[in-house]
Image (tube, rainbow, N blue to C red):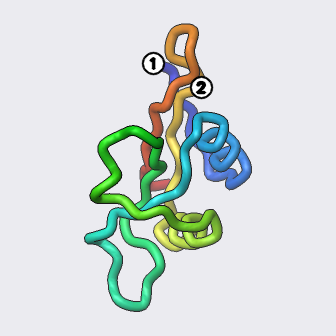
Amino acid sequence: MSATKTTDHETIRHWAEERGGHPATVKTTVHKGEKAGLLRIDFPGYSGEESLEEISWDDFFNKFEKEHLAFLYEEQHGKSKSRFCKLVSR
């Protein structure tokens, strides 16, 4: 596996959308007055339907910057586009 780390918003957004993903938050981690808790990229058809809630890219990146996160991702897995991604500390 060859993963790349970035904080570039456009790179993250493009990578996710190219794979059908969208920004999401874990429902049970959103505190009063916040628009996002723990961040995730959600892909349709995966197990996040019950636990994740779609949020805007603006809300995603506001929390991303507030928490000083970076996006770790893989472009390819074999011959197909990889969906491997992880949010990590900078």
**Cα separation between marks 1 and 2:** 10 Å
Relative to 27, does residue 12 appear above or below in the rendering? above
For this view, does 78 lie left or right of residue 39? right
Q: Looking at the image, which is closer to me, 43 or 77?
A: 43
Side of 38 relative to 28 (left or right) = right
Q: On screen, 62 above or below 26?
A: below
Q: Amino acid at mark 1?
A: Met
| Residue 87 position within the rendered picture, expressed as x and y whole percent measured from the top left | 44, 50
Seen at 53% across and 52% down, the residue is 70
- The type of residue carrying mark 2 is Glu
Given the current orientation, which residue lies at the most extreme right position?
Answer: 10
Residue 47 drawn above or below residue 61: above
Could you tell me which residue is drawn at 52 percent across and 9 percent down? 78
Residue 49, how many percent across, how many down?
Answer: 34, 52
The residue identified by callout 1 is 1
Question: Front-most of 50 and 15?
Answer: 50
Image-quadrant location for residue 18: top right
Give the image location of residue 33, x and y in percent: 42, 90
x and y percentages locating residue 56 in the rendered image: 59, 67
Give the foreground label among 1 and 2.
2
Name the side, left or right, on which 8 lies relative to 34: right
- Which residue is situated farthest in the top direction here? 79
Residue 84, disc? none
- Looking at the image, is mark 1 or mark 2 earlier in the sequence? 1
- Using a 10 Å C-alpha cutoff, classify the residue at mark 1 as few (fewer than 14 neighbours), some (14 to 19) or many (20 or more): few
Q: Quadrant of the N terminus?
A: top left
Which image quadrant for residue 52?
bottom left
Residue 75, label in figure: 2
Query: In what element is the residue under mark 2?
Result: loop
